[in-house]
Every structure is written in C-alpha cells, then in structure tokens.
Amino acid sequence: MSKKFPYGYDINVYIDKAFEKAKELYPWAEKSMLRKNLSYAIEKKENGRYAFVRYFKWSKTDIERKVLDCDSEGFIKRFIDDHGSWIEMVNPVKETFNVIDLIPRGTMIRGWYMECYEFRSHVKGGYSVFLQAGDRSGGASRTIFIPPAYFKLSWDEFLDKYVELVPPGAFYLDKEELKDAPGLKAFLGF
C-alpha cells in the first residue's frame, strides 16, 4: 500500500468509501442514482506508478479516458462532485421559504442584484438553499445542500456553520439577518 492508495488497488473499495461520504450530505442516496455513463479504475501508468482513472462514456463507441492527478481523498471528492447533481435531481423540492424580502428591492451586492434567496425542504429529506443574482447582462444561480449534521447543532451554531457554507459575496445574507427572519427557524426545524 502507498499513501496515495491506503486501501489497496481495488477501485470498488474507493467507490464504496466515496459513496458513504456522499451519504453524509445526501442521506437518501442510493447507488442506482449514480451516473451510468461514468466509471473509474486504478491503472498502472507508463512510469509504473498507479493512478485513478475516470471513464466518461459519450456514446457506445466514444469513451473519454482521463487520468486523475489525485490521492484517495481527492478521488472521493471528485466522485462526489461527479455524482452530486444527479443525486440532488432525484430529490424534488417539497416546500420553500423565501428570505429575499429581508433585502431591500434593488440592492446591489458586489455588482449583482439579489433575485432569489430561498431555503428548500425536499421530498426524500434534507434542505438546500437556492440563490440567484444578476446584473443587466448576466446572472448566476446556485443550489447548495445543507449537511444534515448542521441540524444537530443549536440555532446559533447552525447559523455559524451556514454562513461558512454560503460565504459573503454576491449571494450574501449575514447571520443576524437570517437569525431574525420571521419563520425561518421553524421552517428549518429548530
């Protein structure tokens, strides 16, 4: 074994570890929800060293091979990044709580106008926040799932962790604004 491959050279061991790590954020996840066009391997490179390899199947005959320059922790992160949005898509929104009214209309934050800031509960469980901002010629949106472990904290501790997850920037509301949002604490189950 090496530092890069602490669990040996069986890719399935790393996939299982990555999937268990993904379940910390997506407890409803099942392996059937993973992307079918992605596969992984551990292969020996020309220099005799082992590497993680990712295969992306565009079609039956068009398969892209990419050697990943990472260790086991990097592979786990890459695996979660590769499959996270697919796992999120199978968990539809059940309810929303909009906090945009906390921001005066037309407020510009670092060149962007805040358009949408809503917390969402999901059918299979879990919470996310959907953020959207724009300017006269462009815009962006993000959905960020809130780790279930945050909900085991006190309200104040939750907010401290949350503002680390959604840091200051174009999508910013600070702890005090969220703390005083009427109904948010109850919506999130505190």
Image: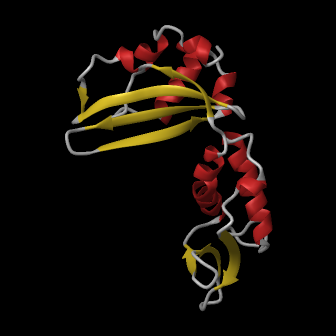
Left or right, 173 with respect to 45, comes to left
Left or right, residue 66 beside residue 131? right
* Residue pictured at 61% horizontal, 85% vertical: 61
* Quarter of the rendering occupied by the C terminus: top right
At 23% from the left and 23% from the top, the residue drawn is 106
Res. 39 image quadrant: bottom right
Q: In this view, does 125 lie to the left or right of 178?
A: right
Give how far across and how far down residue 7 sits, in percent: 78, 66
Q: Which quadrant, please, contains the N terminus?
A: bottom right
At x 57% / y 77%, what residue is drawn? 67
- In the depicted view, which residue is nearer to us: 8 or 103? 103
* Residue 98 vertical placement versus 56 (above, below): above
Q: Position of residue 46 (x, y in %)?
A: 60, 91
* Residue 13 falls in image quadrant: bottom right
Against 45, residue 146 (above or below) is: above
Residue 12 located left or right of residue 125: right
The relative height of residue 184 versus residue 22 in the rendered view (above or below) is above
Can you give x and y, in whole percent of width and height, for residue 38 in the image? 65, 68
Q: Measuring 45% from the left and 41% from the top, which residue is drawn there?
A: 142
